[in-house]
Image: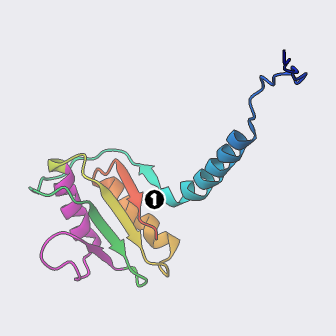
């Protein structure tokens, strides 16, 4: 009779977690790198105000821009490249917000525009009833 020699090796019932830790750290690094890229702008809460309505059919955001010279532009109407006065901007934005209170409103400030010019635009928008304003960044 041939006897088999039993191996005296103990069974190891532990789980090797090193590969799981490696994968977790790689995912953590990926999320840490991509999270800042997902933030596009800053939301600012502004109080309400009343204005006259204007009808709009589209769902694209209303963008009000300030250039380096402090001139205002709005992406509403036929001539978007024509500078507008503060009163024109206030009237147009107020009418749009009266019809569509949830309209996405974005402020785009030129890199060379002063902080004061952007703040004056945001105060103007606050006066016509903008509740939430996003700042456009690149």
Magenta stretch bounds: 71-97
Asked whether, in this view, residue 67 is left or right of residue 14, the answer is left
Q: Quadrant where the N terminus lies?
A: top right
Q: Is 7 rendered above or below residue 77?
A: above
Single out the residue that lies furthest toward the top. Answer: 1
Asked whether, in this view, residue 122 is left or right of residue 99, the answer is right
Q: Is 84 rendered above or below residue 126?
A: below
x and y percentages locating residue 106 in the rendered image: 34, 61
Q: Nearer the viewer, residue 63 or 4?
A: 4
Q: Is 72 in the magenta?
A: yes
Instruction: Assign a secondary structure to mark 1.
Output: loop
Q: Nearer the viewer, residue 118 or 58?
A: 58
Name the image quarter holding residue 58.
bottom left
Q: Is 75 in the magenta?
A: yes
Asked whether, in this view, residue 56 is left or right of residue 30, the answer is left
Q: Nearer the viewer, residue 54 or 127?
A: 54
| Residue to which mark 1 is pinned | 41
Name the image quarter holding residue 79.
bottom left
For the point 72% across and 41% down, the residue is 21
x and y percentages locating residue 27 in the rendered image: 61, 49
For the point 86% across and 19% down, the residue is 6
Mark count: 1
For the point 32% across and 54% down, the residue is 127
Asked whether, in this view, residue 85 is left or right of residue 108, the answer is left
């Amino acid at each position: 009779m041939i006897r088999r020699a039993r191996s005296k090796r103990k069974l190891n019932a532990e789980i090797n977690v090193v590969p799981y830790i490696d994968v977790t750290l790689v995912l953590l690094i990926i999320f840490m790198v991509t999270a800042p890229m997902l933030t596009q702008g800053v939301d600012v809460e502004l109080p309400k105000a009343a204005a006259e309505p204007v009808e709009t059919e589209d769902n694209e955001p209303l963008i009000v821009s300030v250039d380096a010279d402090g001139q205002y532009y709005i992406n509403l109407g036929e001539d978007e490249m024509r500078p507008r006065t503060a009163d024109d901007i206030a009237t147009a934005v107020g009418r749009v917000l009266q019809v569509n209170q949830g309209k996405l409103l974005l402020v785009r400030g030129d890199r060379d525009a002063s902080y004061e010019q952007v703040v004056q635009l945001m105060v103007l928008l606050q006066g016509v009833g903008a509740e939430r304003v996003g700042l456009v960044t690149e």
